[in-house]
Image: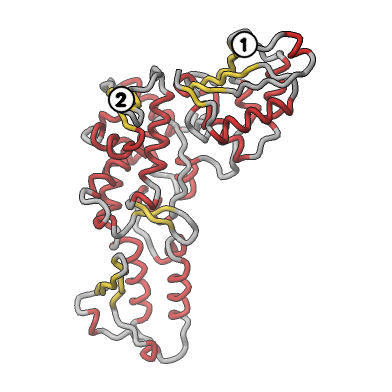
Amino acid sequence: MPRRQRLIEEEKKSQQWPTSLVKIRRQRIVEDGFNKLGVLREELKGVVKVLFVNESGLDESGIDMGGLYKEFLTHFIERAFHPDYGLFKYSAERQLFPNPHSHMMIHSHLDYFAFLGRMLGRAMYDGIQMDLSSCGFFLSKLLGKHNYLDELPSLDPALHKNLMYLKNYEGDVRDLSLDFTVTIDEMGGGEVEELVPGGSNIEVTSSNKVQYIHLVADYRLNKQIKRQCEAFLRGFQDVIRVEWIRFFNPVELQVLISGEDDGGFDVENLKAHTVYSGGYTSLDSTCRRFWKVVAQFSSKEKSALLKFVTSCPRPPLLGFASLQPPFTIHRVHSDKGFWDYMTGKSEDRLPTSSTCMNLLKLPLYPSSSNLRDKLLYAITANAGFELS
């Protein structure tokens, strides 16, 4: 077991955190999550049980044995980190970083950043991997590090290229008409920010251009989103202690958050830790067909299957041996007769799932093609999703 995970497991055994039961409206998952759990700090490490409320205001069926909480956590982070929500933006490489103008989107934006830090920390605390790709410079901030010029390409490769052009410019830099300011695009309006006091009156020359370059990089990487990063880090450290991740670099931290960037998962590892119920065994023809079909899935299809059954598209950090409850394939009895099955007549029913139990309800299918068609339809359209 990795040292970080061992330290977390030791703390879980030594600490007794309270259990929280929260009702969450699916259409307001971020706001309800913030309002119900935002007051918790270290207490967020305790058990969180979720009851979803549908669009009609009715409680959904399902007992949360961990699956509904995972579903909430996954969808909360997916929605709150999306640029459409206003707290984060995409870089040119479609990697996430805090929106410098988040204060114009959400009044209490710093409280939200602190809560998002705690929620991401909680996902890491539980070994639940999230489909988040963050800028290297932002990950450096989570590690408590200061960013320098060499991190700028992860945020703005075009700006880095222009600054390198300036650094190597052999002509008279004064011809470029630069001063020690940056122009910030505030929702369509330009605002000038001085890099040093009186910067608007200081001309960039060949003798001070290196200082200017480093000040521009420092502003973009550190100062412009200083308050957002500080709030996020404060929340993150409420759950994840500094010493647990001190020796990681940004690339390794990204792996802890979202896993290896190879997509999909190890089918054999999942197969080895799957249990069967309802009359199925690993030797049943339908189960053998299932594993044959899944082994041929693309990475995207594997992730869709995992999300369909467990609510999380990525495998646990420590492999499927740590998935609780274990991935289970349950036999669903069909209305079709035995002779229909033996003669290869197609099964019309779709597979369904109970994410609160990590349970896949799988009818008997007479052929691999029939099973593949029904399974793919169910996992890509969520047509067989259940909570019961």
* 301 left or right, relative to 38: right
Q: Is 32 rendered above or below residue 272?
A: below
Figure quadrant of the C terminus: top left
Q: Are marks 1 and 2 in contact (CB under 8 Å)?
A: no
- Dot 1 corresponds to which residue? 333
Give how far apart the Cα atoms at labels 1 and 2 are. 39 Å
Q: Tag count in the figure?
A: 2
Q: Give the mark, 1 or 2, whose residue is nearer the N terminus.
A: 2
Disc 1 packing (10 Å; few <14; some 14–19; many ≥20): few
User: Toward which corner of the image does residue 178 lie, by quadrant?
Assistant: bottom left
Residue found at x 27% / y 57%: 226
* 167 left or right, relative to 103: right
Question: Which percent across, then down, holds residue 322?
Answer: 50, 24
Amino acid at the residue labelled 2: Gly
- Which of 140/80 is in front? 80
Amino acid at the residue labelled 1: His
Question: Which percent across, then down, holds residue 218?
Answer: 33, 66
Residue found at x 38% / y 34%: 73
Disc 2 packing (10 Å; few <14; some 14–19; many ≥20): some
Q: Secondary structure at mark 2?
A: loop
- Dot 2 corresponds to which residue? 46
Q: Secondary structure at mark 1?
A: loop
Disc 1 vs disc 2: which is toward the camera?
A: 1
Residue found at x 47% / y 81%: 168
Question: Which percent across, then down, holds residue 318?
Answer: 51, 29
Question: Which percent across, then down, holds residue 346?
Answer: 72, 21
Residue found at x 25% / y 28%: 43
Q: Is 212 rendered above or below residue 72?
A: below
